[in-house]
Amino acid sequence: MNLAFSQAYPARSIRVIVPYPPGGGTDTAARIISQKLAESFGRTVIVENRPGANGNTGTDAMARAAPDGYTLGMATPGPVTAVKSLYPNLPYDPERDLTPVILVNASPNVLAVHPSVPARSVKELVALARIRPIREGVSTIASIQYLLAEMLNRATGIKMEIIAYKGGAQVATDVVGGQIESLWSVLPVVLPFIQTGRLRALAVASEKRTALLSNVPTMGESGWPSIVATAWNGVVAPAGTPRNIIDALNAEIERSLQAPDVKERFTAIGMEAIGGTPEEFGSFLQAETAKWAKVIKAANIKVE
């Protein structure tokens, strides 16, 4: 008999791997959910940051972990969906090696600049980039933010230099500090800087405006309706994790996402709690993988 089935779950602490450094949107979501899991399960839930290789190092660690429910991972668009079309020799296959648990949250992506940049719209930034170099930071290569930067370059014919980091928090720090001029970022990372005037938001890459930045237009309103991408975080487990454990995790995380305090914490930082079944998350991942495959092929985006 499988030991996971014969013992009450969880019988010990749980580890949640985040494939990025602390301080970013994925790390924030992981810590909110982990705190709730610890309360409901009565066990320690440890968030382990494993950055590297554009999120692939931590995601590979998730895929290689024992399928016993004691190692979970935070899934994000880059290393779980887009990566299949960007890297020909991945050490893992997201679809084969990871099991969907639940879609946790979604968040807008924001194009923002340092206040010293003389551009107050995307069109003005594009015009500026035609006459002088502009450096644009993104969380990692193979992130959705990297793809958005490439899409804007290709849609406009400009050549903003895309500078990839190991995580979103450091990108924001460097733009606020004036080391680089602009960035694509998930809203939770840059919202405090925008609210205090240390960054200027030019557009959100979502279908509609976000309530937290109601005066900031969408990329569609700015003239580029095809440049749309929502950031999201989900929880996955290694393939082969018993279904009863997947169901237990899904139920507890779903309950957490419905809790008023969690919804309020997410909303305050620009995240929307989602939830749903493992099957719904699996279908979502398949659709996201197919979508980014088309975008990457059409734009001829390659990662060196």
Image (cartoon, helix red, strand yellow):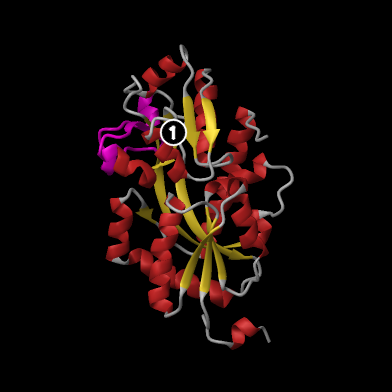
Who's the residue at 54% across and 44% down the image?
166
Whether 82 is among the magenta residues is no
Who's the residue at 43% across and 78% down the image?
41
In front of the other: 222 or 61: 61
Who's the residue at 33% across and 48% down the image?
270
Image coordinates of residue 46 in percent, x first then y, are 48, 68
Image coordinates of residue 173 in percent, x first then y, are 40, 40
When the figure is inspected, residue 60 is found, relative to residue 270, above or below; the finding is below
Q: Residue furthest top?
A: 131
Residue 230 visible in rendering:
no
Quadrant housing the C terminus: top right
Whether 207 is among the magenta residues is yes
In front of the other: 290 or 143: 143
Q: Quadrant of residue 210?
A: top left
Q: Please state which amino acid type lies under the numbered disc 1.
A: Leu
Determine whether, in the image, residue 9 is placed left or right of residue 56: left
Image coordinates of residue 87 in percent, x first then y, are 69, 42
Q: Quadrant of residue 40?
A: bottom left
Q: How many marks?
A: 1
**Which SS class for mark 1?**
strand
Q: Residue furthest right?
A: 89
In front of the other: 16 or 211: 16
Image coordinates of residue 62 in percent, x first then y, are 61, 61
Which residue position is annotated with label 1?
183
Quadrant housing the N terminus: bottom right
CA neighbours of label 1 inside 10 A, class few (<14), some (14 to 19), many (20+):
many
Residue 235 visible in rendering:
yes
Magenta range = 194-222
Who's the residue at 42% across and 72% down the image?
37
When the figure is inspected, residue 76 is found, relative to residue 16, above or below; the finding is above
